[in-house]
Image: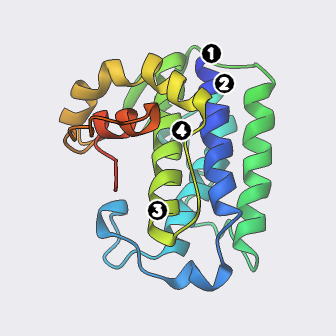
Amino acid sequence: MSPATLFLHADAALRGVIDQLDPADLSAPVPKEWSQLESPTLLGILGRHAYDEAWIPDVIAGRAAVDGDPYADVDRLGDDPIASYDALNDTATAAVRSGDIAETFRFTYGDYPAAEGFAHLATYRAFQAYSIAKHFGIPFHLSPELISGFNEDVTPHADEWRQWGVFPPAIESPADSDDETRLLCTLGFWVN
């Protein structure tokens, strides 16, 4: 699977979870480790994802926030946060599918080859989808394509990325684990 395709699967997984959210839950608190905010809410997390989605066309074109951040301090969610997120997701998806991808992605934490950059973006989305779904009782499983893509492009870097704080400590998988559980344990996200 190409890195761009891995991203598209992860981005679709996150959207699938977001589209199942109850708007009444948007003011609900979420675990503090999900955000740098003092009192994070689901709406705040959705706002961070909207910000990320807004940046995708720029990131894949090789632009960075150091060049100017047109998305800072902008209400991207408006009166219908889920629909607003979906519109940003549509734009990001179209940009990635266009195939016009820079060789280097310039994130606030460093520059990375596009393939690794897509792995970073996919990781954030897929495991937020899993975490949000678990927290709010939304049925969710990583697709076989995501599991395969993560095993190929992410798990080889798990220990290195764990040192940067991307992943929590690995968890020992139960003996009868399926592929999804083994991946989630390897990356430290499994919740029974």
- Residue appearing at x 36%, y 33% in the figure: 182
Q: Where does residue 128 sit, x and y in percent of width and height? A: 48, 52
Cα separation, mark 3 vs mark 1, equals 28 Å
Residue 108 image-quadrant placement:
top left
Which numbered tag is attached to residue 134?
Answer: 3
* Secondary structure of the residue carrying numbered label 4: helix
Answer few, some or many: residues within 10 Å of disc 2's Cα (few below 14, many 20 plus, some between 14 and 19): some
Q: Amino acid at mark 4?
A: Asp
* Secondary structure of the residue carrying numbered label 3: helix
Q: Amino acid at mark 2?
A: Thr
Cα separation, mark 2 vs mark 4, equals 27 Å
Q: Is residue 58 visible?
A: no
Residue at the outermost front position: 176
Q: State the residue position of label 4.
A: 67
Q: Where does residue 91 sit, x and y in percent of width and height? A: 79, 44
Answer few, some or many: residues within 10 Å of disc 4's Cα (few below 14, many 20 plus, some between 14 and 19): few
- Above or below, 189 against 45 in this view is above
> Is mark 2 in CB contact (under 8 Å) with mark 1?
yes
Q: State the residue position of label 2.
A: 5
Q: Is residue 121 visible?
A: yes
Q: Where does residue 85 sit, x and y in percent of width and height? A: 70, 60
- Residue appearing at x 68%, y 54% in the figure: 16
Q: State the residue position of label 1.
A: 2
Q: Amino acid at mark 1?
A: Ser
